[in-house]
Amino acid sequence: MSFKKLKLGLAVFVCIVCFSENAQSQGQTPIVVPDGKTTVPTTTENWNGLYLKLRMTDKWWWYQENHYRRRNSVNNNWDFVGRMSQLYNRFGFTYLFTDNFEVTFGPTLVWQFSPDRGNPEFVDSVFDTRFWHQWLMTQSIGPVKVLHQFRFEHRFQRDNRVGSEYEYKDRWRYKITGYIPINKPRMENKTFFIAPSNEFFFQSSRQSWNIFEENRVYTAVGYTYNNYMFFGGHMWTYGPTSTPGTYRDRHIIRLNVMYTIDFRERRRPLTRDFAF
């Protein structure tokens, strides 16, 4: 089998798996399955993100994410953008131990908007803070760049209901991502690529009835151009709600831009630095 056929086959296989899982949840209405779990209606969202990476020295980076997120209207679960959801801002310093292992740490600032603006039972927005740190490991499997991301978040949160109190919560996340170049033998400048990923979330809090928080299956397509990476796609999520025994799923359209700057003298960003 030729290299091109192998690469195309791998990409098609990943797409089929991801979209098959996504399709299972489309058009759901509340149902109770034999084990007693209840699934609430599917909802939709739109996430738009700007990622910034500044390489200050051979070992140190500045990392930043700014997200503008919307969700469906109260009366239309399939319009994606009917209400504000979050303004999500993550910052951090990255230390590069080796070319294949780095650690990032810093704060996160989030504005959570009311699920029903104008309803006196909710405040229009609440502010929560988090400290996060992660380990990122990379490996190459043929032309495919594989990322293993372990992220830990320590959160002070409250919901939008009037009178709600802040609660401390921990969250652990693991994500595996594969960058599959389409028009090049490896990830480099002017590369079209597909990037399937799967991420698992676990949590602990006094009010949580399930340590499993969410699973996210995301398939992005993108293009690298000089210091920029443009990528976006569809993400399907599944996990428990705050009501014991009840689960939800979401379809989310994600559109993103990453910009990388290398401040070291006469050096340009490396392709491996386009990692999220």
Image (cartoon, rainbow, N blue to C red):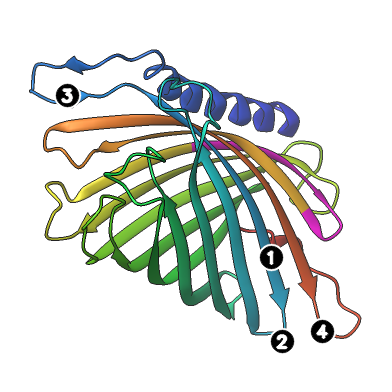
Real-space Cα distance between discs 1 and 3? 40 Å
Where does label 1 land, which residue? 52
Point out the tag, 1 or 3, that comes first from the N-terminus. Answer: 3
* Residue appearing at x 75%, y 52% in the figure: 229
Please give the residue where the numbered disc 3 appears in the rendered image.
38
Q: Which residue is mark 4?
A: 264
Is label 3 in a helix, a strand or a loop? strand
**Left or right: 251 as drawn, with respect to 262:** left
**Residues marked 4 and 1 touching at CB (< 8 Å):** no
Indicate the amino acid at tag 4: Arg
Reply yes or no: does residue 222 show up in magenta: yes
Q: Tag 2, which secondary structure?
A: loop
Quadrant position of the C terminus in the picture = bottom right
Q: Earlier in the sequence, mark 4 or mark 1?
A: 1
Residue 276 seen in render: no
Judged by its main secondary structure, the magenta piece is strand
98 above or below 220? Answer: below
The magenta region covers 218-228
Please, what is the three-letter code of the amino acid marked with disc 1? Answer: Leu
The disc, 3 or 2, on the residue closer to the chain's N-terminal end is 3
Which of 182/239 is in front? 239
Q: Which residue is mark 2?
A: 57
Question: Residue flagged by tag 2: what amino acid is it?
Answer: Thr
